[in-house]
Image (spheres, coloured by chain):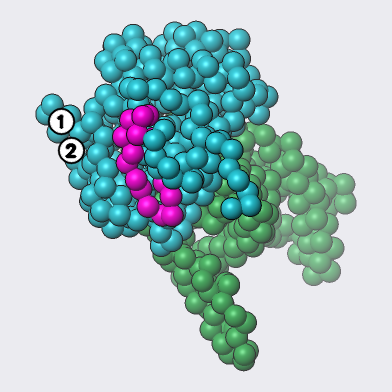
Chain colours: A cyan, B green
């Protein structure tokens, strides 16, 4: 499958998304969405609008409640062992990082490498070193996740998702918990990934990020979508977002709203 | 990967039953309890089979990750418990000898001391006590660790990285515990037999070490060794399965972890006793 030059990374037709914790409970209905390779999508939605569940479904962590979902042109329910090669073309950054608490940052980042290529831990750590340096994580590499700040945890989670050089990266509210300096670093870094970062061989990466605050995201090269009232609305480019009059969109943009109305 | 876990857990969607309104009559309650029990058994068996399947199919996968994990688990469920087991072995030898010497002395049958020790310690108390201690010390830790990991989303994180959670989290624990219970039982038995003689000697039982150990050797058959190995490996395997299953299956929130830990320990004890009963049958049949 991977030999075909399929240009569509994500293709959803009439997909209903169940909640991760209880799949019988539908959080988003009738999603029709396609993401071409190399695109950068930002999915906006308020808390509990189903952003995380949609992304987890897109990552193959759970099957769609109904509808058809194709990932890299492959009809997917949820990933099993047969689709391992496809799964590794995709990286996922959880909100809050979800690093393994028993392992140091370095071990966390090196684990996928070690597991999938069966490297001895020293060799894997050495390979991970380049990425740690690139992401300015070297000084923290030997600390345990509970001992470092959320800003850096999130960045370590990004490193762990990038270690296998995926073609597509899904990020669940990556900027939600970040402070100012980190926010700028993330926006710059994600743009570099989107244009093609030397770490991933210079190939433009497909990116999908969710957010509950649209203010940091304006950019002509990004595409936007809105999750509202259990529906998925692809909006298009930033100019379309700015001109749309949706009240929830205004809230996500932190436009002052008249509370009395 | 997710499929593996989901298969076991879908079978035990017990929340519905637990949350349903309280039944009116006692028989309804009994029925519900029985139903829950059967669902749990079904889930445990499915989980055990899945774990065995993964263990066999992936024995060669990611050795560099899994082997150190297995060593770590053996250290935790075996080596780290040695000091405690030394103490328990001393106590066990003392208890059993203290009681039997006074009882056997009434009939002038202290000559059967070695035989009694084999029946009591090698066949029954040794393995069961070792299993209970490992359950208490390591099994509880498994439930809490896995329950926390699941509630904090680390299982999903493993899946997102294409790492099979059963392979990475469960298999090393199961192997570590099976080996741990087996090895600790052997140490416990040897320790108890030696300390038993020590206390018999202190109580002036006219028995030379040579006679004592000759009695023991005569009372032991090849079947004892085979069944001891089987039994302790089964104890370790099933304690690990029960504790890991409850750690991973239920807690989706941190608050659930303590409740699940209690349930897992109770079921661990029940499973051990059931296995023990099965082996008594085997002894009686052969």
Secondary element at image label 1: loop
A237 inside magenta stretch: yes
Residue B212 position within the rendered picture, expressed as x and y whole percent measured from the top left: 70, 49
A123 vs A83, nearest the viewer: A83
Secondary element at image label 2: loop
The region drawn magenta spans: A227-241
Q: Mark 1 vs mark 2: which is more N-terminal?
A: 1
Residue at numbered disc 1: A6
Residue B218 position within the rendered picture, expressed as x and y whole percent measured from the top left: 58, 53
Q: Is residue B187 above or below residue B128?
A: above
- Residue A199 visible in the shown view: yes
Q: Label 2 marks which chain's residue?
A: A
Q: Mark 1–mark 2 contact, CB under 8 Å?
A: yes
Q: To which quarter of the image does residue B272 belong?
A: bottom right
Labels in figure, total: 2
Residue at numbered disc 2: A73
A119 inside magenta stretch: no
Q: Is residue A117 left or right of residue B22?
A: left
């Amino acid at each position: 499958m991977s030999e075909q030059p399929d240009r569509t990374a994500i293709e959803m037709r009439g997909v209903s998304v169940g909640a991760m914790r209880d799949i019988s409970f539908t959080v988003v209905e009738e999603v029709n969405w396609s993401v071409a390779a190399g695109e950068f999508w930002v999915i906006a939605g308020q808390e509990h609008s189903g952003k995380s569940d949609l992304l987890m479904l897109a990552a193959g962590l759970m099957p769609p409640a109904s509808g058809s979902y194709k990932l890299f042109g492959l009809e997917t329910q949820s990933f099993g062992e047969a689709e391992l090669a496809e799964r590794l073309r995709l990286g996922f950054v959880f909100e809050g990082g979800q690093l393994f608490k028993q392992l140091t940052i370095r071990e966390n980042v090196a684990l996928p490498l070690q597991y999938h290529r069966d490297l001895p831990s020293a060799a894997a750590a050495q390979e991970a070193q380049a990425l740690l340096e690139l992401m300015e994580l070297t000084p923290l590499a030997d600390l345990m996740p509970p001992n470092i700040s959320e800003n850096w945890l999130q960045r370590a989670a990004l490193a762990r998702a990038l270690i296998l050089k995926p073609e597509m990266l899904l990020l669940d509210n990556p900027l939600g918990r970040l402070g100012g300096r980190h926010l700028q670093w993330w926006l710059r870094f994600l743009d570099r990934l989107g244009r093609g970062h030397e770490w991933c061989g210079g190939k433009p990466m497909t990116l999908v990020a969710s957010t509950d605050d649209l203010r940091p995201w304006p950019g002509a090269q990004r595409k936007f979508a809105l999750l509202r009232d259990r529906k998925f609305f692809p909006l298009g480019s930033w100019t379309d977002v700015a001109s749309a009059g949706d009240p929830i969109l205004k809230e996500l943009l932190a436009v002052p709203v008249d509370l009395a109305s | 990967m997710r499929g593996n876990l989901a298969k076991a857990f879908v079978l035990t969607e017990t929340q519905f039953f637990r949350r349903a309104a309280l039944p009116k009559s006692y028989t309804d309650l009994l029925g519900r309890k029985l139903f829950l029990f059967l669902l749990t058994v079904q889930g445990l068996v499915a989980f055990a089979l899945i774990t065995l399947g993964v263990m066999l199919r992936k024995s060669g996968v990611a050795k560099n990750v899994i082997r150190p994990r297995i060593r770590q688990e053996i250290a935790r469920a075996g080596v780290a418990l040695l000091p405690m087991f030394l103490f328990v072995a001393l106590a066990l030898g003392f208890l059993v000898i203290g009681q039997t010497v006074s009882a056997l002395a009434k009939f002038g049958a202290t000559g059967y001391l070695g035989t009694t020790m084999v029946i009591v310690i090698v066949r029954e108390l040794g393995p069961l006590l070792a299993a209970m201690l490992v359950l208490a010390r390591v099994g509880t830790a498994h439930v809490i660790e896995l329950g926390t990991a699941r509630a904090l989303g680390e299982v999903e994180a493993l899946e997102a990285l294409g790492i099979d959670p059963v392979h990475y989290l469960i298999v090393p624990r199961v192997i570590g515990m099976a080996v741990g219970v087996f090895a600790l039982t052997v140490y416990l038995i040897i320790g108890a037999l030696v300390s038993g003689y020590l206390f018999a000697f202190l109580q002036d039982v006219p028995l030379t070490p040579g006679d004592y150990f000759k009695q023991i050797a005569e009372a032991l058959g090849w079947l004892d060794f085979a069944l001891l190995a089987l039994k302790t490996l089964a104890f370790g395997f099933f304690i690990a399965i029960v504790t890991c299953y409850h750690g991973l299956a239920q807690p989706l929130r941190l608050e659930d972890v303590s409740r699940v830990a209690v349930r897992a320990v109770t079921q661990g004890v029940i499973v051990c006793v059931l296995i023990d009963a099965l082996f008594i049958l085997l002894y009686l049949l052969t």
